[in-house]
Amino acid sequence: GGRVKRGAPPSRWDQGEFNRLARQKWDPRSTKGLSDPRLFWSYNKQLIGGVLPLSLFAGGHNHFVSQFAQRRGWKPYSVHTTYQYAAAAGKRHRLREGMLWVDPPRYYDPPEGLLSFKLEVPREMIYPPGGMDTLRHIRLITYQLKQVKSALAIAFTLGRKLVMPRITCGYDKAWYPLSSGFKGNGYKSKGVFPGAHHYILPIFDCPLDHFLEVGMLHPEVTIREYSLLDNPRTPRHVTASITNVELSTASASMASEIQRLRTNYPKSKVIHLTNLAKVDAVKDLLTSAQQSAFMSKFGYVRGSWCCAPTADAKNGQPQSASFSLVQGGGRRRFLG
């Protein structure tokens, strides 16, 4: 270890150094004298290495996207927040989504209250006839973000924290082209991270960093993860105080809906909107001053997605996309 540190610390990656040392004169096929075929001799044949099950010793993709442990009903021993796209804020939020991050009690019971909503997505958008492709994935995310925008506008105007919904992603996300699938499995794996199993699509409970820059939302201040109300750390008096509310869709009464929510439900820990998809909250419910305040706070919130399977790109579909929480689908970038 000392020799490695004396080498050139600024230019060496600690994980890379560990890998180099572990592979030094190793023999992963040699199991002689070892108690299990998953064990092997590592580092000059002086250390014992082993293969651990990904479900229990998970990387970021295995746990949060492929969801190996969740599919089996297991609890992992460890989760490494790799394969995510929003730096430290994204790592913290993924751990919160997985109920693996411990926050102060106030986080789970904010005094100003919470707001949640029923996300409505047509089944044919999740399972489109002819299968998922890049454009359909982008439309699916954009469709859901429109409802998130409305809910966040209401929550922000009321001074409540928005409990994010469980978003569904049609495709995975990567830094390079997603799999185009292969003929042997009927191209079912089209759209997954290369090497991942086809059955992970669609991705239910899709990580927030797959479509928005988490840090731009300042999670502790404005939102809560989709799993908050299922988290055992959330007090019972919060989860027992959920009020279902249907928004008025009559044009004559829409302008007073924010005031009604504020006046009628001040003691409800959680206001749950049951028909949010039927209104455009920013346009229909907020005053001009409230719209300006919302735009000033969230107008810059964006995210991105990449990269289209080669098969889609060759068919003229965009290689990547950027999303704007407030403005909608945003720009698409094509090859060439």
Image (cartoon, rainbow, N blue to C red):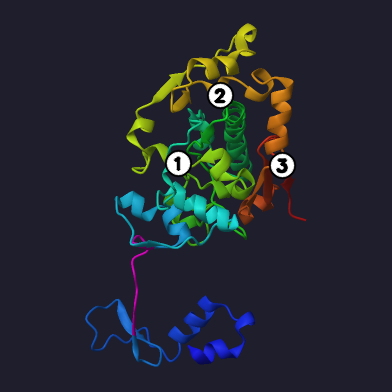
Nearest the viewer among 265 and 332 is 265
Nearest the viewer among 159 and 210 is 159
Q: Give above or below for 306 relative to 34.
A: above
Which residue is at a point 71% across and 33% down the rendered structure image?
295
Q: Give above or below for 121 relative to 62.
A: above
In the rendered image, which residue does mark 2 sit on?
A: 277
Instruction: Give the mark, 2 or 3, whose residue is nearer the N terminus.
Output: 2
In the rendered image, which residue does mark 1 sit on?
A: 106
In the rendered image, which residue does mark 3 sit on?
A: 300
Q: Is residue 9 left or right of residue 264?
A: right
Could you say where residue 279 lies in the image, as x and y percent from the top left?
Answer: 60, 20
Could you say where residue 296 lies in the image, as x and y percent from the top left?
Answer: 73, 35
Q: Which residue sits furthest top?
A: 252
Amino acid at dot 3: Tyr
Instruction: Give the mark, 2 or 1, whose residue is nearer the N terminus.
Output: 1
Which residue is at a point 59% across and 81% down the rendered structure image?
12
> Which region is colored magenta?
48-57
